[in-house]
Image: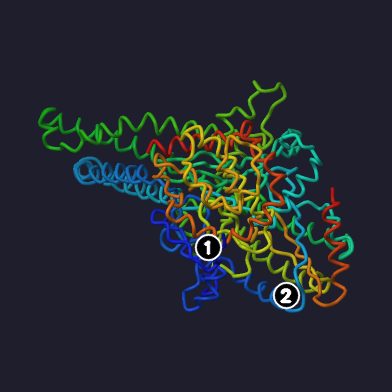
Amino acid sequence: MHLGLDEPVRECQYNQICTRNSSPMETLSHKKKRTPRRKWQIFPGRNRFYCNGRVMMARQTGVFYLTLVLIMVTSGLFFAFDCPFLASNLTPAIPVIGGVLFLFVLGMLLRASFSDPGVLPRATPDEAADLERQMDAANGSSGPGYRPPPRIREVVINGQTVKLKYCFTCKIFRPPRASHCSLCDNCVERFDHHCPWVGNCVGKRNYRFFYLFILSLSFLTIFIFAFVITHVILRSNRSGFLNALKDSPASVLEVVVCFFSVWSIVGLSGFHTYLISSNQTTNEDIKGSWSTKRAKNNYNPYSYGNVLTNCCAALCGPLHPSLIDRRGFIQPDTPQPLSHSNGSGLYPSTQNHTHMAAATPLLHSDPVMMGRAGPPPSGKTSLGGPCSSLAPSQPSLPSSMPGLGCAGDMLTLRDPDAHCHHHHFVSPEEMPSPLGPSSLVLPFAAHGGHLNPAQLYDPASQDSLHEDSVRGLVKLSSV
Amino acid sequence: MLEYWRNRWGGWNTSGETEFHNLQELRHSASLATKVFIQRDYSEGTVCRFQTKFPSELDSRIERTLLEDTVKTLNTYYAEAEKMGGQSYMEGCLACATAYIIFLCMETHYEKVLKKISGYIQEQNEKIYAPRGLLLTDPIERGMRVMEVSVFEDRGSSGSSLSSSATSGGSAQR
């Protein structure tokens, strides 16, 4: 079965950053008249980009719009109905301070939502191959047994041993404090949490904006709450309580919204103030990474020792630049990171190991999907012609092995209807085309195939990435 | 000013493009044999530092001290970029006070140091590495994960023996 390399990948209708052609190299050689494409257009994570790459958000942004609407409607009602009375009867400073607070809240929210949280770009094929070689060499020949090599590096930071885990999706050893967000499918530096209210991950680059957002929002909420109550009381003194409510009906809505918001937002601000002062992330706090319950001499190696330095470091420290260069133009010679969610990121040149490596995250997550979705449709093993030389050593997943060299199609083979709304999966009709670039890989994959199956399924039981993918899949499937 | 805007809004490829042209020239006469990666050193936490351990694949290509000096200089540059002192606090407070709008007009201290770094790497490539058939890639183009050293072999010269020693060095590295 031979498929031409020039056959373009049909555009995936759901994925707005899905590319049209099989590889950027062909794009640039055949169609020089086209404007050069920017890197955000082939970004492998599950993010949305707007304004030609200037704005970067998570895929699910519904709750962000809710946040925006709540803030704007409540503040709008405050300025329209309560402020005239308060300005004339108390002081005009009230709407001014309210206005400044409102603008600051909005600015911080937009900054936290639209900026890159500190995404780590995925490894280039050469890097991934180099790491795989190092890990194979380090672990030596583990024989024919399927004992998995550990994919963990230990490093001592400030006297505390920290484990660096290997990320199967991004093909890198995660730096300390980094974590892989299953919703955005990116490794994020100093990962705090994924915030649906903000519509983005909160990480190294946007943590201060997030913190200032919730802090200023708590002030704004308390401010509006207090002054709306003042307004109603002053009116009631003049004309009675019921008349006061009739004269300014919006106040009731504002009080209700603010009352319920105050508890959660002020609580969250307090929690994050504690985290900042102890220089921890939400992720670390939830896992109890530095808790003394784990080990007696467990301590946080990143803390500077005193509260003030920790706060200054988090809020006033240097602002790191974005590592993903989303608005840069794609250079034809620049190696692009591996992408398993669409076929466009795969380069057909001599990348035997790396294509094998590209297949691993898919197979790694297969046991998860098998468990959720049931057995894969048996009719879709038609792609398996050349791939069947990779004799499956795990008979429980028969159709997974044929896909070993066809990285981008793996998910299509086992994408039953229940998961059809996972937008980043290529639909089954588009299966033949992505095989183009990967058809070269199959002969190489056949050689390397016997090495990898053992390694492929190992960390599934141990890696928390596995849990993350499960959680991510459950969340996505519940939408 | 225009240059500044082009840099800010058009990605950081301006210095990368220059390097790309150098790479083009190198590639006309040489072919890429292998790539050696210098990994990050996390022993001091999350600050950006690269390992100063000399990769054995480059034993035959360059003197140890030259590469180690380059890596150490780069480490000091990164330390300067991420230093938390009076200047960075001032910048942070000023930025917060202006709701970060000031960064539309001004470069952050980190970005300024990154420019210095790319200039330094270019200079090192021209003076030291390109004559030895090597090319350093700016770590920012690899997401600050690794420092990539591309090893080139001359086409049509005694490249075959050199490339075989490079690859055998690579497999025997651990």
**Residue A39 marker:** 1
Per the model, the C-alpha gap separating discs 2 and 1 is: 24 Å
Q: Position of residue A110 (x, y in %)?
A: 41, 51
In the image: residue A98, left or right of residue A295: left
**Where the N terminus of chain A falls, by quadrant?**
bottom right
Q: Position of residue A195 (x, y in %)?
A: 45, 40
Q: Identify the element where label 1 is drawn.
A: helix
In the image: residue A425, left or right of residue A23: left
For the residue pair B25 and A189, the one nearer the viewer reads as: B25
**Mark 1 crowdedness (10 Å alpha carbons): few <14, some 14-19, many ≥20:** some
Task: Report the label total.
Answer: 2
Task: Name which residue type carries label 1.
Answer: Lys
Q: Quadrant of residue A66?
A: top left
**Where the C terminus of chain A falls, by quadrant?**
top left
How was this image coloured?
A: rainbow
**Residue B27 marker:** 2
Residue placed at 43% from the left, 30% from the top?
A: A267
**Vertical comparison of A274 with B51: above or below:** above
In the image: residue A75, left or right of residue A268: left
Q: Is residue A312 visible?
A: no
Q: Chain of mark 1?
A: A
Residue placed at 48% from the left, 55% from the top?
A: A431
